[in-house]
Amino acid sequence: MAEKNPGGAAGAAGRAPVADSAEAIRNVVLVGHSGAGKTTLIEHLLAATGTIQRPGRVEDGNTVSDFDEVEVRQQRSVNLTPAPLVHNGIKINLLDTPGYADFVGDLRAGLRAADAALFVVSAAEGVDGLTQLLWEECAQVGMPRAVVITKIDHQRADFDEVLAGCQDVFGEGVAPLYLPVITNGHVNGLIGLLSQKFYNYATGKRAEREPGPEYAAQIEDYRGVLIEGIIQESEDESLMDRYLSGEAIDAKALVDDLEKAVARGNFFPVLATGTGVGALELLEVITQGFPSPLEHPLPEITTIDGKAAPSVSCDPDGPLVAEVVKTTSDPYVGRISLVRVFSGTLRPDMSVHVSGHGLAERGHEDHDLDERIGALTSPLGKTQRSVGKAIAGDIVAVAKLARAETGDTLSEVDRPLLMRAWAMPDPLLPVAIRARSKADEDKLSQALGRLVAEDPTLRLENNAETRQLVLWCMGEAHTDVLLDRLAKRHGVEVERIPLRVPLRETFGGTCKAMGRNVKQTGGHGQYAICHLQVEPLPSGGGFEFVDKIVGGVVPRQFIPSVEKGVRAQMERGVVAGYPMVDVRVTLYDGKAHSVDSSDMAFQIAGQLALKEAAAKIPTLLLEPVDELSVLVADDHVGSVMSDLSARRGRVLGTEPVGVGRTLVKAEVPALELTRYAIDLRSMSHGTGSFQRTFLRYEPLPPHLADKVAGETG
């Protein structure tokens, strides 16, 4: 590919880049593990197009996409951040994503907003397991992909080894477009395999030359594989025969077929970048070889009641269909929504219908309402640059959508539509918190509501049993960022407290007990005596109340009162304050008074009888047991199974899933799973995942039961 115009002044800082058609837009999400160089690569691309004067450094905290206070302090991305630029008349919306597994929610949002994924792999570190999982995830949905190997000038860089690793891990269709030329550890430039030119950067500026004869054999080998991979996707069926017969294929035809091959998700070009090298070549490939929004299928769209909607395409004149892919709350500006427009045109001050469905279990209630949007801006770091409209295929920031949340659909008021939500992982790390002061407590609810609206991977739980406020997070780093935002952005100080797991109580044997509630000291008194027999039921048996009163010793109208009192005491527990389950209570005798007996008197008698039974026979504490499904690479199965056994778990079996992965099924007490999200990530090097569902209650081992009873006593 030949460079036509190295500049992009139309995207310079201060003026927002604009696109007049979807054909002139490329939406590209950068994917890769933390430290692979995504943010640094974006800096060099922005500088190469004149969007910024010079590239910033993550270490200095002055990069465009890592401007959040948390990102500056931690020196890593934690947010989905757009970085728009213009190259050769094409607007490129680069989407920087976090590389740490805790922030996969922002990564998934980036994949939704983009039309192609650029996988960033460090030449010094290679492909990690998480990147491989994300590649497979993109493959399942047919996302067009390319690979850029960064840091080729690093002292530990090995381009050939990392390229071979990419081809091994990512599979067929991975082939380089450029080869780095390295002399005595110094990167001099790149050889273009299609153009067969050497792009020399020895002087700091790109100069086109003929490659030396010593590279002829290497070029021939790599170029042959590259061309064969490209023309396999060509619509010209004669092209392969012509190539195999020795005919020279026109470079323009190859570039056109390259774009088709990438768009179909069947061919994955590999590029190389280093300090001052490769940015222009990458921009050429993005503009000429990546698909536009017109070539990427739209997500499923329905009416708000779930019925099929008329067909919608990426047409600026079509009905409005847009999606909020990211929500942030600015203390000065208010809520800002990053929106991908899939159809129609979004304009300032227009009224839109906001629909959000399917995330009620995470604290996002289903909602349908009309709102008027505020200004439209094109964000570049902290700078919000005003734009007059956003056409189908573009990405824009929208102000003043007070109720819109991440994942919501924006459509026309008189034609409301709903986009199918993208898949989000379940947050599985519970963290109990409480406000540090009364002033913090007053502000906590509103601040948490804003965080939940921004982050669909956060679930908020007010546990009625344990009376704890629990944040369900993706991991420790996710938790730290959330608590930091509560303190710094919303001014709410909280502290972590030990998480309480809801337990249950039950009787460990059978006995008879009496509840005596007699208070006759003059005037209207209380008189109720009941005799109960209590016995345990099998696990899951619930509660049974049996009436065996004979002869009216307890009047019929007071028998339900005894049951009501027993139920009330069971809810409060009799030992550690946990609800009682799996019990049969039989009322077989009692006494009443014609004047002093009452509904309340017999309720109290039933409660007293249950307490007396607890004093006579052992009372067991029951712990919840979850069914656990753990998906890990085969290499980690042994350590995962050993760890589950150490958690008092019972491994039920294993089964292969795809190639190189195994699903481990087990039953594990919930008390042992409070930090499993962190521990599994450590054991599996970030590639393991798990799901848990409640199974049943089982007796807590005596030494743990004594400890819990002591803590609550």
Image: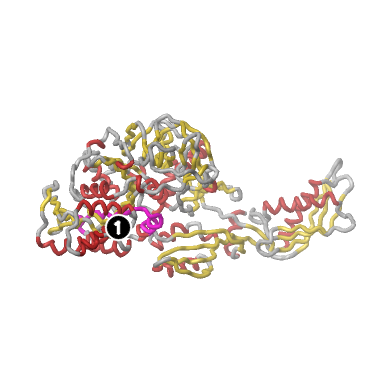
Q: In the figure, residue 181 lies in which quadrant?
A: bottom left
Q: Is residue 399 above or below residue 541?
A: above
**Would you place residue 519 above or below residue 647 in this image?**
above
Magenta residues span 133-155
Q: Is residue 427 visible?
A: yes
**Residue 5: percent from the left, percent from the top?**
18, 42
The residue lying at 75 percent from left, 51 percent from top is 565
The answer to if 281 sits in the magenta stretch is: no
Along the line of sight, the residue nearer the viewer: 225 or 355:
225
x, y percentage for residue 158? Answer: 22, 61
**In this rendering, does residue 40 appear at all?**
no
Residue 3 lies left or right of residue 559; in this view the side is left
- Left/right placement of residue 350 relative to residue 383 reads right
Write down the residue under mark 1. Answer: 233
Residue drawn at (84%, 49%), measured in percent from left and top? 557
Relative image position of residue 142 (x, y in whole percent): 38, 55
Q: Is residue 612 left or right of residue 370?
A: right
Most extreme residue toward the front is 238
Quarter in which the C terminus is drawn: bottom right
From this view, report whether residue 359 is shown above or below residue 13: below
User: Is residue 149 covered in magenta?
Assistant: yes
Task: Please state which of residues 173 and 508 is positioned toward the viewer in this rendering.
Answer: 173
Q: Is residue 408 above or below residue 31?
A: above
Label 1 neighbourhood size at 10 Å, few (<14), some (14-19), many (20+)? some
Question: What is the quadrant of residue 33 in the picture?
Answer: bottom left
Disc 1 residue type (three-letter) = Glu
